[in-house]
Amino acid sequence: MTSPLPIHAVLPALLDVLRVASNAVLVAPPGAGKTTAVAPALLGEAWCTGEILLLSPRRLAARAAAERMAALAGESVGKTFGYATRMDSKRSAATRVTVVTEGIFVNRIQADPELAGVSAVLFDEVHERSLDSDFGLALALDAQGALRPDLRLVAMSATLDGTRFSGLMGDAPVVESEGRSYPLTLRHLGRAAEARIEDSVAGAVRQALREEEGGILAFLPGVAEIERTAERLGDIGGAMLHRLHGSLEPAAQRAAIAPDPEGRRKIVLATSIAETSLTLDGIRVVVDSGLARRPRYDRAAGMTRLVTERASQAAVTQRAGRAARQGPGTAYRLWEEAATAGLPRFDPPEILEADLSALMLDCALWGVTDPRQLAWLDPPPEAAIAEARARLGALEAIDPDGRPTEHGKAIARLPLPPRLGHMLVRASERGMARTAAAVAVLLGERGLGGSDADLELRLRRWKGERGQRAENARRLAERWSKLVPAAASGRGLGGGPPRLPSDSGADAGGPPPPPPPPPPRGGGGGGGGARGGGGAAPPPPPAPRPRRGGP
């Protein structure tokens, strides 16, 4: 029997709102329980006869939320509660709540603007302001206004910015929940300028082991720093060391989140993937490096790079709160207390800094040549729109009026950023779809085949890799290669293209890749959005779309 969560006190108010209104905003601090409590509560409502989609910012969080809801219901995941991510999914005909990553939702609503069979869409962690979350909400509001006035939309935020979302959603009622309050002690240890971050984090972890009780969660900027910190910690008697980042096998991620089966003390070295949406059982101490690695678009180079920078005040507050989710906790910060005021208050919304090429092409397929026609909290910058339009023109994806070309429609049908989609379509025309699909997967998934800059070397390594993640990635590449003929012009792969360096579905002992989906609504892929008309053909299964940023 689980103890009541703070969110349970306001669920009746939220249910009352959604019985008379289509939209609502839920403001609930971390630890209130909104991620796993709201969707199950909606299932019993008379208006909720279809599926509920719960959007999660990260694959790990999506899987963990579905598994937690299923466990609370006494079921296995994939029955009433399921999930769908880029690399993995578990759902069935009986699934009523599907946790999806934001990119998959964008792809699904593009394929079926009416969201047939969906009763509600819950946007979790909207305060993070990822590009796909902002875009998904904009599309959902557009579809709701034009096609589905009965569709319920709920924006769920952990910060007090509910009034902005309320205004965006037609002055939607705001329901506020209190958080679960446990005492949190902040300790500022500082760090010498010449000290390596992994040395400082390892030292703080050892100090916490001596001074505090319970598990320890340490935040580091990236995988390399995690590995170096693990080396410096070595073998810690009586404690179990875990890594937690997006490149790990799912089993290793689950082990980092769950209680230790032998009751040992747990040390988790994590990236910012552990900042939100997850509760790590047994954690009472946080060690914060104060650094984060974020994707930043370099307009001069025309590329998105990972940049190590100071974490924002909002981020370090979220991190510290991880120590007090289940009881009193302590956060060790590796900077002086006075320096906190100098940190940026928030991470900027991704839409203000990102490459908008994919957004522009998606909007063109939705029937909108200017993204600013949609509803945004922060409209995309004019300069970024012009740059994206020029890039898509160079790829021959849009015409001078901003409408998608046939080549652009083929690119848009692929679950890839425009430049990689362009590569895959053109490679298919030369009989090299499998090789191009493998390269696209390697470029989108960090860690497969190692981190070498030599893609050919990584392809060879990946061929021999075992484990669920490597195998899922091979199946993903195989599926992408089979999507190209349908996406391009019906042309096949040709005679004897180079074989993808992987197992096929049958060779791998699993199900074969699904057949290529039919074209999107709207007669060949254009104008299929809420503004674009088109028949009411059944939607194809959503093809996973890579996140445009983040872990």
Image (tube, rainbow, N blue to C red):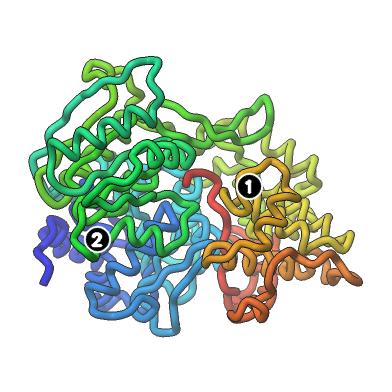
* Residue 182 visible here: yes
Residue 227's image quarter? top left
Q: Amino acid at mark 2?
A: Asp
Horizontal placement of 158 versus 443: left or right?
A: left
Front residue of 348 and 455? 455
Label whose residue precedes the other's in the sequence (2 or 1): 2
Front residue of 442 and 352? 442
Residue at image coords 63%, 76%: 508
Horizontal placement of 270 versus 72: left or right?
A: right
Q: Whole-percent x and y of residue 190?
A: 26, 20
Q: Amino acid at mark 1?
A: Ala
Q: Is residue 222 above or below residue 108?
A: above
Find out whether the residues at labels 2 and 1 contact each other: C-beta distance under 8 Å.
no
Q: Whole-percent x and y of residue 304?
A: 60, 36
Q: Is residue 410 above or below residue 551?
A: below
Q: Quadrant of the N terminus?
A: bottom left
Residue at image coords 38%, 20%: 195
Q: Whole-percent x and y of residue 297?
A: 58, 32
Q: Which residue is mark 2?
A: 260
Residue 337: assigned label: none
Residue 358: assigned label: 1
Q: Secondary structure at mark 2?
A: loop
Residue 287's image quarter? top left
Front residue of 163 and 77? 77
